[in-house]
Amino acid sequence: MPGAAFCIAGCLTACLALLTQQGAAQNVRAQRMDTVRAAQADAVMRFDIPSKSLQDALDDFDVVTGFSGLYSADAVALRQSVAVVGTFTAETALRKLLAQSGLLSYFTARDAYVLEPQAGNVTSAMPVGPDVPDGKEFETLLQSTVRTAFCHNALIVPGQYRIALSFRVTANGSVEQARLLDTSGSKARDVEILRSLRSIRFPRGPVNSAEPFVMLILPHEQALVADCGGAR
C-alpha cells in the first residue's frame, strides 16, 4: 500500500545512517537479517486470499509475507484480484494475485516490490504518498525532464536496461536523496544514472516536496512509447 511504500523510501535511509553510527557489530546484525529475509522470500507460505479489490488483496498479501509494495493508489484503483489459496512462494502468490489485473510485479529487494502496467512505459514515475492537486502535471514534467537528460547521455540512454530509482524533488526543483532500488547490470551505468539524476534542475518543485518519487526505466520490449525519439 502507498503508506508502506513511503516507509521503504524513508526508513531505509534512516537505517543506513544508524549502521554508520553503530559500526561493525550492527553491520553483522544487518547481514544476518538480510539472510533471514532472503530465506523468507524463497520459503513456501500458506495463502488464503479470496478474490477482492486489488488494494485489499495486496494489503492481505503484505500482512502474510511482511513485504511492502511501491505503487500509486491510481494504479490499483477499480482493479480486482484473483483468489490465491494454497501454499506458494511469495513471488508466485503475487503473480497469481495479479493475473487478471493488467499489472506486473517487479522485485526491487527481497521484501519489496513495484507494480507496473503490463505494457510498461520507458519512464514512469509515481509519488509515494498522498496525491497533490497538481500531481499529474508535475509527473509529466518530471518524466519528460528525466527522459531528456538520460537520452542525451550515451551511457544511460534508456532501452537496454531496467532500473528503479527513488528520489525527492525540493521546492526549488533540485534533486535530493537519489538512490537506486536495484542495479541496471553495470556499475559504471549505475554511477552515471545517479550523477545525472542529481544534476537535474526542474523549473519548479512539486506541491509537497517532502514526498519521494519512484521511477521505473524499462527496456525496449516492455516500452509502450519510443525511448528517445522525441527527446533529442
Image (cartoon, rainbow, N blue to C red):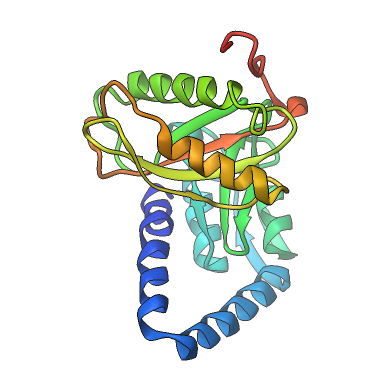
Image vertical order of residue 43 relative to residue 13, above or below: below
Image vertical order of residue 66 relative to residue 133, above or below: below
Q: Nearer the viewer, residue 119 or 167?
A: 167
Q: Where is residue 4 in the image (x, y as percent from the top left)?
A: 40, 56
State the residue at coordinates (36%, 57%): 10
Image vertical order of residue 229 relative to residue 72, above or below: above
| Quarter-of-image position of residue 116 | top right
Q: Where is residue 85 in the image (x, y as percent from the top left)?
A: 69, 60
- Residue 170 seen in this snapshot: yes
Residue furthest to the right in view is 221
Q: For this view, does 43 lie left or right of residue 165?
A: right
- Residue 72 seen in this snapshot: no
How many callouts does the rendering have? 0
Q: For this view, does 94 lie left or right of residue 21?
A: right
Q: Which of 168 and 34 is in front in this view?
A: 168
State the residue at coordinates (41%, 25%): 142
Classify the position of the C terminus by image quarter.
Answer: top right
Residue furthest to the bottom in view is 25
Q: Position of residue 21 (x, y in %)?
A: 35, 80
Q: For this view, does 6 lie left or right of residue 120?
A: left
Q: Position of residue 47 (x, y in %)?
A: 64, 64
